[in-house]
């Protein structure tokens, strides 16, 4: 009843090609933006910024990047933690070695370095496919783990091998309060999200999806596999690199190489599978699932008044998390995004049955 | 020269240990098409079961003999792995028939989470001992020929022999027995196998039980070396390059891959490592596997990937 | 089927979101002193984390049961599981820092989490105690206002090891080869600056052997050691790397009595399963954590006998457990010192507890009265010295138990103080921190 497209006629190509063609979608997006930019900063506590919103947003950005590679282009990668690390360390080096480096440029620089790295480690994808590629990308992961530990200039000759960033400042403005950090991250995520959405519905996105579905056929009709695969790696690593820089700068503040280990890579892979491969919105859903669920499970014993030890609680939390992953994969292998899409389809008819 | 031989030999032995773990991956992939990310968790679960039962049985049943305790614990742990296999098939695999590889991979990651935590909840998160009487002291040979002699590890050689025996048994099983043939049929095409009457569910339980048994053997060997604790599940990360180098579907490939990766790791760490500051063997193994894959994308003995348009 | 799944899932998600939102709002306020307990009872380092956490909690329970709290103010505590993960540690920190009258101090139990939390602690004004771990240069209180590496740092541990070795080598290390087998992470790399400095000054050679975490397979490291034949090996390992390393040392025939392990690699669980194979393995203790003392008896009497024990009664007295007890004691004494200054019998704020940490003066008599007469030697912290006095002993595994095989060592500050100054200055410059003056 409310979600009908009746009466919405497009009178120009431009209107037809809009990102959100249905007016209700546009309103919903604007409402969401209003909530995110206005309501949340006013209502949320510092704790929820630092422990919920900021990690959720940064991880959704990384998930968007990984989704482009895995969901849209079909190249399974287990080395995402490495790309995040490269982005973070590169941004750190730019900030530390160049005085007065604006934050945004440092982040973008980190993304660019991660992009170069991603393309380099994406070259094997031209020859290796499927699960073999997945395990081969672990080479990137472990290499970066070693590199950031061993090579001194990466950590600016830090004695301890860990790095810590200075204040986040850009053109004189300093991001020090959680609310400011949240708004910074939110802005970046919104921009990158829209850019990614646009990219995947353009020509290059179609090339990626063709490579994913049937790469031999795609090559036959003239899509260059080298170009498609390497651009997928490039764009994906850029976004993941920026997300990694944000993770280090905004969320952790100071980190050692193990912060971007294989657990992070697997966590991101969880997010995009649960959220939905090949869907930008799915990246957000998946990130919400992975960030919020452990916190939620942490609180359940409190509310039920059960006095269980932290170890038992932690183990149960892991078990329930694992079981829910399997449950979701059984119930909806295409992820939460598909559930959402189904919901929207139903909403178009509601309250009528057909 | 002596030291080089020692390094190579050490690498071969380490490689066999990796191959033990890799075997589980290959078996399960070969027969159910699932890359079992939960293999490390299965090794942990099996090792925990073995260690704890070996500790509990003497207490519950009131006897003293360590040999008997180990034997009973081994049987009990094997039964546990069969139960795990049955549960995994019943609750997860049955409903994920025909899904894409990556979905199944993620499902096994979820199962890994469950197994890790369930194992620690049931059996505890501290360190536990597995003592099957393996000789721990070094063996030095040829000390007249080489200065200082060549170091051989009796424990590792024992593990290598065990791995070889396991591989031979499994290869014979796959080639010669009816169940083995059924397993290969299922790996080839689930639907075709079902249509000629092969009970898919039972086959999968068998496959995962064998995978679990292999995990148990690997868990006992590694547990006897490291002590049984959560980190044992991380030996799976050492086994991945072995699996892809040898080919995901080849049992002899797992062994050969293990030997190559083992030697490659040790030689690179000892001879190349000092120039790069050390600690390179982890990523070198993966880079080595990657290099081989660039030449042979299916691994050394894997099934050729045939593209159908 | 699709529709009902959809509704099921939506309901679940909505419920979850509302619960998280609700819980993040109010925190109960009470006139008690809150101590957050960041622990890892799961994950790679659980075997170390579990007794540590038990010890920390049991001592707080003892103070409540035996003394009725600190001057009548009961101690409340809450454990938060970090699994040694930095992001989880940050989440726990954020959740617990404002609880009650404010968190009395964070023992993060991890160098990685310490890094992530230190910057935030500066802003949130919460003390972070890092006894026996963390940044070795955080001894300098003029730069690290909120960090307290009490009882010892990795540099003091290295120094003590070298002292014990020098004793065995008749006073001189000249011409010797000392290898460092270390966990390839900031934790493992900590001793390197001091080792290099001492090597340059005293003429011994340092061989570095990093082991990639988690370190389950160390054949290449110990084969190299077999070839290079260092006179001694300093072992900076953690978790499964410890038993893996000791077993590999056994398998390659390197004499275990030439190995010196830092305190995190010298707990009971590291060697008890190896038994005879680890005979001779040396470790350095934080103060005298391998001893038995009156406080342990008190814990058994007032906590375990009443059924309130956190872990099992057999765990009381393990080395890792004792460390936890000592750490909690320092936390409680800091609270007590803060109360002396800011008002006895009332809860104190984190800033006041920080003052307490900075003005600890635990004399031998006080320690004896608290039940630590055997386990600890006097500690006195000050504005410029956030470590207090470091004391350590060397223990050795004889195949069945640990024996204390040396007297009390205190590190030689000649090189350490210079290093602390140098690194603290660098840190202050990097982070734009204005050093305090300690007048």
Image (spheres, grey):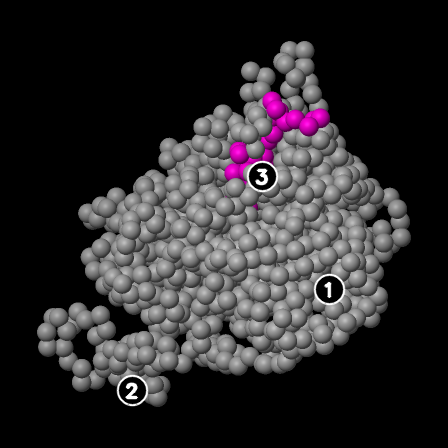
- The quadrant holding residue C393 is top right
Q: Indicate the position of residue B218 as horizontal and vertical percent values.
A: 64, 42
Element under disc 2: loop
- Local packing at callout 1 (Cα closer than 10 Å; few below 14, some 14-19, many 20+) is many
Q: Indicate the position of residue B142 as horizontal and vertical percent values.
A: 67, 15
| Residue at 60% over, 42% down | C413
Element under disc 1: helix
Instruction: Have a look at marks 2 and 1 and say if they share a chain.
Output: no
Q: How many marks?
A: 3
Q: Indicate the position of residue B109 as horizontal and vertical percent values.
A: 52, 56
Query: Which chain does the residue under circle 2 lie in?
Result: A
- Residue C414 disc label: 3
Considering depth in this image, is C255 or C424 the residue closer to the camera? Answer: C424
Mark 2 or 3: in front is 3
- The quadrant holding residue A275 is bottom left
Query: Which chain does the residue under circle 3 lie in?
Result: C
Mark 1 or 3: in front is 3
* Circles 2 and 3: CB atoms closer than 8 Å: no
- Mark 3 or mark 1, which is nearer the start of the sequence? 1
- Residue A2 disc label: 2
Q: Was residue C359 drawn as part of the magenta stretch in this picture?
A: no
Q: Was residue C179 drawn as part of the magenta stretch in this picture?
A: yes
Is B240 placed above or below A200 here?
A: above
Does the image show residue C99? yes
| Residue at 53% over, 66% down | C126
Instruction: Have a look at marks 1 and 3 and say if they share a chain.
Output: yes
Instruction: Have a look at marks 2 and 3 and say if they share a chain.
Output: no
Q: Indicate the position of residue C87 as horizontal and vertical percent values.
A: 49, 60
- The magenta segment is C169-197
Q: Which residue is mark 1?
A: C59
Is C102 placed above or below A81 here?
A: below
- Residue C40 disc label: none
């Amino acid at each position: 009843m409310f979600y009908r497209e009746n009466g919405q006629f497009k009178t120009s190509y431009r209107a037809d090609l809009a990102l959100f063609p249905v007016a209700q979608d546009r309103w919903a997006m604007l409402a969401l933006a209003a909530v995110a930019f206005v309501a949340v900063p006013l209502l949320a506590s510092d704790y929820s910024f630092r422990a919920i919103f900021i990690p959720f947003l940064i991880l959704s950005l990384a998930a968007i990047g990984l989704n482009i590679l895995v969901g849209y282009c079909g190249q399974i990668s287990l080395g995402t933690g490495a790309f995040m690390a490269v982005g973070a360390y590169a941004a750190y080096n730019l900030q530390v070695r160049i005085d007065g480096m604006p934050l945004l440029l440092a982040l973008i620089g980190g993304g660019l370095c991660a992009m170069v790295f991603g393309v380099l480690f994406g070259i094997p994808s031209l020859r290796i496919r499927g699960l073999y590629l997945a395990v081969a990308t672990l080479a990137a992961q472990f290499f970066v783990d070693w590199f950031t530990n061993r090579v001194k200039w990466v950590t600016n000759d830090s004695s301890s091998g860990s790095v810590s960033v200075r204040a986040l400042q850009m053109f004189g403005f300093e991001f020090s309060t959680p609310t400011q950090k949240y708004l910074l991250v939110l802005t970046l995520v919104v921009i990158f999200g829209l850019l990614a959405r646009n990219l995947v519905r353009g020509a290059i996105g179609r090339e990626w999806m063709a490579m994913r579905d049937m790469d031999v056929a795609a090559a036959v009709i003239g899509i260059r596999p080298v170009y498609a695969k390497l651009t997928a790696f490039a764009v994906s690593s850029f976004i993941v690199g920026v997300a990694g820089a944000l993770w280090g700068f905004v969320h952790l503040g100071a980190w050692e190489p193990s912060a971007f280990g294989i657990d992070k890579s697997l966590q991101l892979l969880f997010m995009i599978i649960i959220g939905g491969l090949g869907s930008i919105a799915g990246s957000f859903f998946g990130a919400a699932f992975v960030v919020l669920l452990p916190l939620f499970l942490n609180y359940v014993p409190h509310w039920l008044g059960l006095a269980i030890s932290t170890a038992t609680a932690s183990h149960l939390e892991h078990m329930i998390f694992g079981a829910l992953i399997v449950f979701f994969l059984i119930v909806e292998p295409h992820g939460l995004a598909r559930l959402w899409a189904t919901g929207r389809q139903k909403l178009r008819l509601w309250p009528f049955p057909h | 020269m002596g030291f080089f031989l020692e390094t190579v030999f050490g690498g071969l032995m380490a490689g066999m240990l990796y191959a033990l773990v890799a075997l589980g991956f290959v078996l399960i992939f070969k027969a159910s098409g699932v890359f079992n990310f939960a293999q490390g968790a299965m090794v942990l679960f099996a090792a925990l079961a073995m260690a704890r039962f070996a500790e509990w049985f003497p207490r519950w049943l009131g006897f003293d003999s360590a040999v008997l305790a180990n034997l009973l614990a081994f049987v009990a742990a094997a039964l546990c792995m069969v139960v795990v296999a049955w549960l995994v098939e019943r609750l997860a695999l049955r409903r994920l028939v025909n899904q894409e590889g990556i979905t199944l991979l993620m499902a096994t990651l979820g199962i890994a989470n469950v197994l890790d935590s369930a194992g620690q909840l049931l059996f505890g998160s501290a360190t536990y001992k597995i003592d099957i009487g393996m000789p721990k002291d070094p063996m030095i040979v040829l000390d007249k020929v080489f200065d200082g002699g060549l170091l051989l590890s009796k424990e590792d050689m024992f593990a290598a022999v065990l791995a070889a025996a396991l591989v031979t048994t499994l290869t014979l099983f796959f080639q010669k027995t009816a169940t083995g043939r059924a397993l290969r049929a299922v790996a080839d095409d689930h639907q075709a196998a079902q249509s000629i009457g092969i009970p898919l569910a039972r086959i999968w339980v068998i496959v995962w039980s064998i995978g679990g048994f292999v995990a148990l053997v690997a868990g006992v060997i590694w547990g006897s070396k490291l002590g049984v604790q959560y980190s044992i599940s991380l030996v799976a990360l050492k086994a991945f390059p072995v699996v892809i180098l040898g080919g995901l579907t080849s049992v002899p490939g797992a062994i050969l891959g293990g030997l190559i990766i083992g030697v490659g790791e040790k030689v690179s760490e000892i001879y190349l490592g000092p120039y790069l500051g050390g600690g390179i063997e982890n990523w070198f193994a993966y880079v080595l596997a990657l290099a081989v894959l660039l030449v042979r994308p299916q691994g050394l003995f894997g099934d050729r990937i045939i593209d159908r348009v | 089927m699709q529709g009902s799944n959809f509704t099921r899932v939506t309901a679940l998600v909505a419920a979850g979101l509302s619960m998280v939102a609700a819980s993040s709002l109010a925190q109960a306020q009470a006139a008690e002193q809150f101590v957050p307990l960041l622990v890892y009872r799961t994950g790679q380092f659980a075997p170390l984390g579990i007794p540590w956490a038990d010890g920390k909690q049991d001592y707080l329970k003892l103070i409540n049961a035996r003394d009725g709290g600190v001057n009548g103010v009961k101690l409340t505590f809450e454990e938060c599981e970090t699994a040694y993960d930095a992001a989880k540690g940050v989440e726990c920190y954020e959740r617990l820092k404002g609880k009650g009258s404010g968190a009395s101090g964070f023992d993060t139990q991890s160098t990685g989490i310490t890094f992530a939390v230190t910057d935030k602690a500066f802003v949130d004004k919460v003390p972070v105690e890092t006894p026996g771990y963390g940044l070795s240069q955080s001894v300098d209180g003029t730069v690290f206002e909120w960090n307290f590496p009490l009882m010892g740092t990795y540099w003091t541990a290295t120094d003590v090891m070298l002292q014990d070795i020098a004793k065995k080598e008749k006073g001189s290390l000249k011409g010797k080869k000392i290898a460092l087998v270390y966990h390839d992470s900031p934790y493992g790399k900590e001793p390197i600056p001091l080792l290099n400095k001492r090597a340059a000054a005293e003429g011994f050679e340092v061989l570095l052997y990093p082991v990639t975490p988690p370190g389950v397979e160390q054949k290449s490291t110990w084969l190299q050691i077999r070839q290079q034949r260092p006179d001694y090996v300093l072992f900076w390992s953690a978790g499964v790397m410890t038993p893996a390393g000791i077993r590999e040392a056994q398998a390659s025939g390197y004499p275990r009595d030439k190995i010196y392990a830092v305190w995190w690699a010298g707990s009971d669980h590291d060697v008890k399963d190896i038994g005879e194979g680890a005979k001779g393995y040396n470790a350095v203790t934080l103060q005298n954590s391998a001893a038995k003392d009156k406080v342990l008896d008190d814990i058994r009497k007032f906590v375990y006998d009443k059924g309130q024990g956190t872990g099992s009664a057999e765990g009381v007295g393990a080395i890792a457990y004792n460390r936890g007890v000592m750490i909690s004691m320092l936390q409680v004494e800091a609270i007590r010192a803060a109360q002396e200054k800011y008002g006895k019998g009332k809860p104190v704020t984190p800033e006041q507890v920080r003052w307490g940490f900075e003005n600890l003066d635990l004399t031998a008599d006080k320690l004896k009265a608290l039940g630590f007469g055997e386990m600890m030697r006097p500690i006195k912290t000050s504005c410029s010295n956030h470590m207090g006095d470091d004391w350590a002993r060397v223990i050795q595994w004889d195949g069945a138990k640990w024996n204390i095989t040396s007297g009390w060592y205190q590190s030689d500050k000649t090189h350490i103080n210079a290093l602390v100054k140098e690194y603290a200055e660098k840190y202050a410059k990097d982070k734009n921190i204005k050093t305090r003056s300690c007048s």
